Image (cartoon, coloured by chain):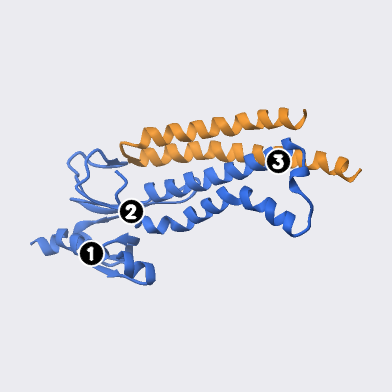
Chain colours: A blue, B orange
Amino acid sequence: MFSSYHEHPTNIQFEGQDEDEKITLLLRSHPITNLSWILWALFLMFLPVFLPAVIFALGFGNPFDLPSAYYSGFLVINYLLTTVIIFEGFLYWYFNVYIVTNKRVIDITFTSLLLKNVDLAPLENIEEANSSITGFLGTIFNFGNVAIQTAGANIAIHMIKIPNPVKVADFILDRTKNNAS
Amino acid sequence: MLAELIAPIIKLGILIILVIYSIFALLIVKQVDNMSKTLRTPISPLVRAISIIHAGVAVGLIVLMFGALND
């Protein structure tokens, strides 16, 4: 359910899916790419624990002298921010997907709160799929990018930080019409 | 004296942040709705429920903090 590499997933449908269209591969960014927002969330979660001590140590007085309602207000705002970082981080990771079906490759990207971008590339138009693994984390956890090129166009779909990029590029090329025939 | 001057500003600041957060939480409900329609998965209803509860809590906290800060 939370896999970032899922072959032939069941119980998953996407908007615009044809009746005879089957999902053969569902991809998300590698889970380790969530580390940045997880670290921010942890920092904010523990901020109220160490911030008063830091303020006191720096000689700005005791922050607990504030009326308790004000202190509660700051705590509420802090934990609301933590909640939204966790929730939004999860949403962007979970719903930004790359789908390979028996007909096409689809890139569904939500770039901001209300902005959705969907790129489609029919399998018969795909000419090239190039994979690359870069960086320290990419090498250790085996994730990277796959660039899919279609006939007469620049890169049509760019899969970013997906697991097993070499395997994915091969998976897609194996299903293109040119290679199948 | 200074504390009496600053106190209402802090109160207003906290309430304004909570109001902005609530608007943001309502936008997240719309965003999750949009996401769930685009990709239907077994956890889509759960995510949608969490977004609605989250927005409800955000709105409720405005009332709660308004009462707490005026005590």
How packed is label 2: few (under 14 Cα within 10 Å), some, or many (20 or more)?
many
Q: Residues within 10 Å of mark 1 (few under 14, many from 20)?
A: many
Q: Which quadrant of the view contains residue A138?
A: bottom left
The quadrant in which residue A180 appears is: bottom left
Identify the residue at horizontal 61%, vertical 51% (top origin): A47
Residues at discs 2 and 3 both on one chain: yes
Residue that appears at 38% across and 38% down: B36
Q: Amino acid at mark 3?
A: Tyr
Kind of residue at badge 2 = Arg
Q: Residues within 10 Å of mark 3 (few under 14, many from 20)?
A: some
Q: Quadrant of the C terminus of chain A?
A: bottom left
Structural distance between the alpha carbons of marks 1 and 2: 14 Å
| Left or right for A167, reference A163 | left
Examine the rendering and report whether any part of residue A154 can be seen: no
Separation of disc 3 and disc 1 at Cα? 53 Å
Q: Secondary structure at mark 2?
A: loop
Give whichever of A34, B49 is nearer the camera.
A34
Q: Residue A25 in the image: state x and y as whole percent.
A: 23, 52
Residue holding disc 3: A71
Residue, x 19% and y 47% (percent of image)? A8
Q: Quadrant of residue A151?
A: bottom left
Label 1 sits on residue: A169
Q: Please report, as a chain letter, where disc 1 is located.
A: A
Furthest-left residue in this view: A181
Q: Circle 3 — which element?
A: helix
- Mark 3 or mark 1: whose residue is earlier in sequence: 3
